[in-house]
């Protein structure tokens, strides 16, 4: 039975972000007979790949089974970071070796810097704010693990991470629920749907065809070309790229067996006012906990709402049940919010891999940039979308360290 008392009278099951930037409603135009590259998936990876290819003079068509941007990209939490976004769930050096681990961390930092340059140079207004981030420990042991992670991250000598003991955590989050945490000094937030809308604008200005509500069903080799079949006809294309993330389906069984879709749910409170929001999050920095099944809180860009979300359960549960679970978790963290109504609640599918690391490369005729693994999607999928474009263009310089990673599956998955 749904607890209706937690929902506002104006409740919406659409993402809070869509109030300012809804998905792009592409006209139901005819498919082109041919193009240079078909990109499947209109999230950050697909659109960033399309922009790079179009700037190189290629004719690009982006197809999506839903509206352009309706999937996970415009449902994200809006968290940004460099190296802290790619290895939070693993010991990176033990997983990939010391040399490759160092390359991956450096590349993740480069991706973050590239993002900031990109939105500035292309005048994308997406509420970017360098406000830090607190990774909060749920237990004293969790605090110790974060301290070890801090040493890994600070190995570059720039000391952008520091530990915050429990006695000082109220500078960032007004609760006794946590046991201190690790501060990411250069963590940032963004409005994910506004950023996506900026990518759409760039694509359209470069002549990229954006076609929604068109599912790609299969791909066949046709001489030196590929015939890309959809539920609305087919396109002949020289190359095809997958940017489908947690929505990867049977179009490429090889990729589907290596991507684990994981539902994540978020909700926005009714308007609380800036004073209440800053009372709960005094530094306006988001807080994300250290559990395997995470939860997080951040201010809305206008500072009037709290956005609270995460993976309600490691195993699948209904959207309604996810909201109830998250609401209870929110009250545990912030008892001050008891009785506050929920204005928006929504879910989306993130893509995980078996080693918890993003992937880029080419296999079985498909170029791909996949799997944000939670928390790093905006930065890494934008970056790896550009790297996939470089692979399609045949560029041999500045290859990604992520291409060196094996893309594993498991028996019977």
Image: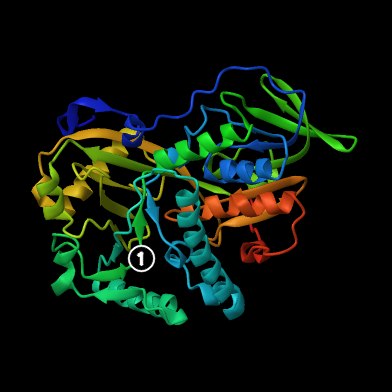
Relative to 49, is 130 on the left or the right?
left
Residue on which disc 1 sits: 186
Closer-to-camera residue (53/192): 53
Residue 278 position (above or below residue 199): below
- Give the residue drawn at x 14%, y 53%: 278
Relative to 319, is 218 on the left or the right?
right
Closer-to-camera residue (319/73): 73
The quarter of the displayed image where residue 209 is located: top right
Mark yes or no: residue 348 visible: no
Relative to 210, is 264 on the left or the right?
left
- Give the residue drawn at x 45%, y 51%: 120
Task: Report helix, strand or loop for mark 1.
Answer: loop
For label 1, count other residues whose C-alpha is less than 10 Å away and answer few (under 14), some (14-19) or many (20+).
some
Mark yes or no: residue 43 visible: yes
Estimate the x, y position of residue 172 in percent, counting from the top left: 19, 63
- Give the residue drawn at x 65%, y 58%: 407
Estimate the x, y position of residue 35 in percent, counting from the top left: 75, 32
Question: Which quarter of the rendered picture does the N terminus lie within?
Answer: top left
The quarter of the displayed image where residue 194 is located: top left
The quarter of the displayed image where residue 337 is located: top left
* Visual colour scheme: rainbow
Residue 32 position (above or below residue 47): above
Relative to 327, is 314 on the left or the right?
right
- Number of marks present in the image shown: 1
Estimate the x, y position of residue 82 in percent, counting from the top left: 45, 64
Closer-to-camera residue (279/228): 279
- Give the residue drawn at x 56%, y 36%: 42
């Amino acid at each position: 039975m749904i607890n209706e008392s937690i929902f506002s009278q104006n409740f919406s099951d659409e993402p809070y972000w869509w109030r300012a930037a809804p998905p792009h409603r592409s006209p139901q135009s005819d498919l082109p007979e041919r193009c240079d590259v078909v990109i499947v998936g209109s999230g950050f990876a697909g659109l960033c790949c399309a922009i790079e290819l179009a700037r190189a003079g290629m004719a690009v068509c982006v197809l999506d089974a839903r509206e352009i941007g309706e999937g996970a990209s415009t449902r994200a939490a809006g968290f940004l970071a460099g190296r802290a976004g790619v290895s939070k769930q693993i010991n990176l050096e033990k997983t990939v070796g010391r040399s490759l681990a160092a390359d991956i961390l450096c590349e993740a930092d480069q991706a973050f810097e590239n993002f900031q340059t990109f939105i500035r140079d292309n005048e994308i207004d997406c509420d970017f704010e360098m406000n830090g981030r607190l990774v909060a420990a749920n237990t004293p042991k969790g605090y110790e693990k974060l301290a070890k992670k801090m040493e890994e991250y600070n190995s570059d000598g720039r000391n952008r991470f520091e530990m915050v003991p429990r006695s000082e955590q109220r500078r960032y989050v007004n609760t006794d629920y946590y046991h201190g945490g690790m501060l990411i000094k250069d963590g940032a937030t963004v409005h994910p749907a506004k950023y996506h809308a900026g990518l759409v604008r760039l694509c359209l200005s470069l002549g990229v065809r954006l076609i929604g509500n068109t599912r790609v069903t299969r791909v066949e080799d046709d001489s030196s070309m590929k015939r890309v079949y959809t539920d609305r006809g087919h396109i002949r294309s020289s190359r095809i790229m997958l940017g489908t993330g947690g929505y990867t389906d049977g179009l490429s069984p090889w990729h589907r067996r290596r991507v684990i879709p994981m539902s994540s749910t978020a909700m926005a409170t009714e308007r609380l006012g800036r004073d209440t929001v800053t009372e709960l999050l005094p530094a306006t920095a988001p807080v994300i906990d250290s559990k395997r099944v995470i939860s997080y809180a951040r201010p809305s860009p206008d500072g009037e709402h709290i956005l609270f979300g995460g993976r309600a359960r490691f195993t699948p549960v209904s959207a309604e049940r996810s909201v109830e679970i998250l609401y209870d978790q929110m009250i545990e963290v912030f008892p001050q919010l008891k009785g506050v109504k929920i204005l928006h609640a929504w879910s989306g599918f993130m893509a995980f891999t078996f080693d918890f690391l993003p992937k880029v490369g080419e296999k079985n005729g498909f170029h791909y940039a996949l799997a944000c693994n939670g928390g790093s999607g905006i930065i890494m999928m934008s970056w790896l979308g550009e790297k996939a474009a470089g692979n399609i263009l045949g560029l041999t310089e500045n290859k990604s360290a992520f291409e060196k990673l094996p893309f594993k599956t498991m028996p019977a998955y």
